[in-house]
Image (tube, rainbow, N blue to C red):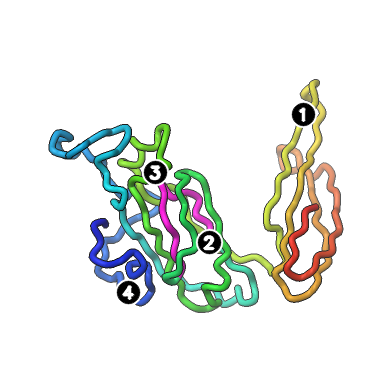
Amino acid sequence: KWPFTSTEEKLASPRLSDSSWEKAVQPGRLFTLDPNVDPATIPNWNRVKTHHIDPEDGAVIRRTVTIPEEWKNKEIFIDCDSIYPGGRIYINGHLVADHASGLTPICRNITALVKAGKPVTVAVRLYRNHPHIMMDMPRHSTDFGGMAQPVYIFAKEKCHIEDYYLPSILDESLKNGKLEGNVRLYNASKKKQKGTVTVKILDPNGVYLTEEAFPFEINQGQKLEL
């Protein structure tokens, strides 16, 4: 926890041993409420605007895991469902994201920084205070700073669905509707790819209703919206 005895980058580096660090369960609470002591003893204490919390206050949390061998030749990502109230993500000591949106998820491609079958050190530099804290975030940030939701490392094929937006819309009768939107593909492989994206619609019980297929052809390095 802050104040740090070394630089943020060194604390995130896999070359640094964390065997003596305090263990922390995450997702979960990392900081405790300020007024466990008399607020009058804290200079500039302000429960709403958090002026008393230094902008550098926070912590570095980290964990080392092994990338599965079967992920070789795939695209590898890290997804943080929530960093509260904000933080910076490091992969093997390399900064990959600076996130200051509280409960908003963030996902990054880390393929170039990891190897299948090898360990990877994930470090998150957490902040207790930052310029974008607003609304009801201040009172929660002093209480609940930490990874508020799970963190995942996962893999996709070189040619994969990068994102999609498929909202359903009802007409004025509230009985008939339609599904429309788009699916974005990305081909990270070194050759052209062909395939089909199929959208299936199920009822609330999971029973198949209908489907529609959308064939595609995508060049190497290309993004394509269907």
Mark earlier in primary sequence (3, 2):
2
Depicted 9 relative to depicted 82: above or below: below
- The residue that disc 1 covers is 170
Q: Secondary structure at mark 2?
A: strand
In the rendered view, tell whether residue 141 sits above or below residue 222: above
Disc 1 is placed on an element classified as strand
For discs 4 and 1, the disc positioned in front in the rendered view: 4
Residue in the image at 79% along x and 21% along y: 172
Q: Is residue 108 left or right of residue 38?
A: right
What label does residue 78 carry, if any? 2
Q: Return the residue nearer the eye: 51 or 167.
A: 51
Q: CA distance from mark 1 to mark 3?
A: 40 Å
Please report the bounds of the magenta region as a residue range: 79-91
**Dot 4, crowdedness within 10 Å: few (<14), some or many (≥20)?**
few
Mark 3 neighbour density, 10 Å: few (under 14) some (14–19) many (20 or more): few
Q: Left of 206 or right of it: where is 38?
A: left
Q: Quadrant of the N terminus?
A: bottom left
* Alpha carbons under labels 3 and 2: distance apart: 25 Å
Q: Which residue is mark 3?
A: 131
Q: Are marks 2 and 4 in contact (CB under 8 Å)?
A: no
Q: Are marks 4 and 3 in contact (CB under 8 Å)?
A: no
Q: Nearer the viewer, mark 3 or mark 2?
A: 3
Q: Which residue is mark 4?
A: 16
Residue 164 image offset from top left, x and y in percent: 70, 50
- Tell me whether circle 1 and circle 3 mark residues in contact (CB < 8 Å): no
Q: Earlier in the sequence, mark 1 or mark 3?
A: 3
Residue depicted at x 56% and y 77%: 69
Query: What's the residue type where badge 2 is placed?
Result: Ile
- Report how far apart the C-alphas of labels 4 and 3 lie in the structure: 30 Å
Q: How many marks?
A: 4
Residue type of the residue flagged with mark 3? Pro
